[in-house]
Image (cartoon, helix red, strand yellow):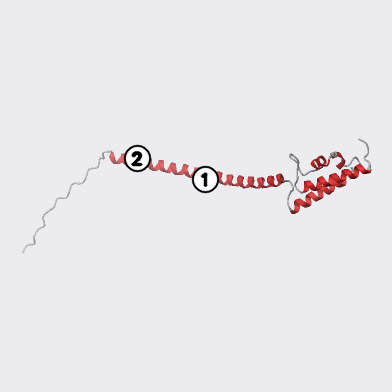
Amino acid sequence: MGRLSSTELEHNEAAIRAAMDRLLRGELPPGGKCDIKTLASEAGVTRTGFYAKGTRPGPYQHLAEEFERRLKALEATDGSPDPRDTQITRLKGENTVLRERIARRETTIAELTSFKTLALSRLAAQHDEIQSLRKNQAEPTRLQPLPTPIRIPATRPCS
């Protein structure tokens, strides 16, 4: 590709600025992002023009720097012009909240499982104790009841 004439350069810069304005307003093409690659595609120029070639700056490098500056300023004030970036940020926040909620639930489940195990073991021990007491009560014992005391009639005092 040969050198661009000043007319072609001016035409391309105008196309880049127009594309830059559209992208920064959020008018993104399907499958595109708010980046240099999409900017070059929308303006109809090659992406290599936005980067330096050795020690020599690219013909549109100043526009790439302007685009990055404006994009950062826009992100600092209003957020990203790309709705997907906003959605990704929102989803990451929701993901963090949900992961914390799951961790709390798992902790609760572990505590309840431990409590259930302890309660079941106590119930089993109490059941065994009750069974043992019932068995001991049903077995004949060698103990004999004491004889009932004989009642002596009360005597009348002598008069």
Seen from the viewer's position, the closer of residues 134 and 94 is 94
Whether residue 123 appears in this view of the structure is yes
Give the SS element for disc 2. helix
As drawn, the label of residue 153 is none
- Tell me the kind of residue under disc 2: Gln
The residue positioned 78% from the left and 48% from the top of the image is 24
| Mark 2 and mark 1 residues within 8 Å of each other at the beta carbon | no
The residue positioned 58% from the left and 44% from the top of the image is 102
Seen from the viewer's position, the closer of residues 106 and 91 is 91
Whether residue 64 appears in this view of the structure is no
The x, y position of residue 6, in whole percent, is: 93, 43
Q: Indicate which disc, 2 or 1, sits on the residue closer to the N terminus.
A: 1
Where, by quadrant of the figure, is residue 49 drawn?
top right
The x, y position of residue 157, in whole percent, is: 8, 62
As drawn, the label of residue 131 is 2
- Tell me the kind of residue under disc 1: Glu
Q: Which residue, as the protein is rendered here, is positioned at the far top?
A: 1
Seen from the viewer's position, the closer of residues 68 and 15 is 15
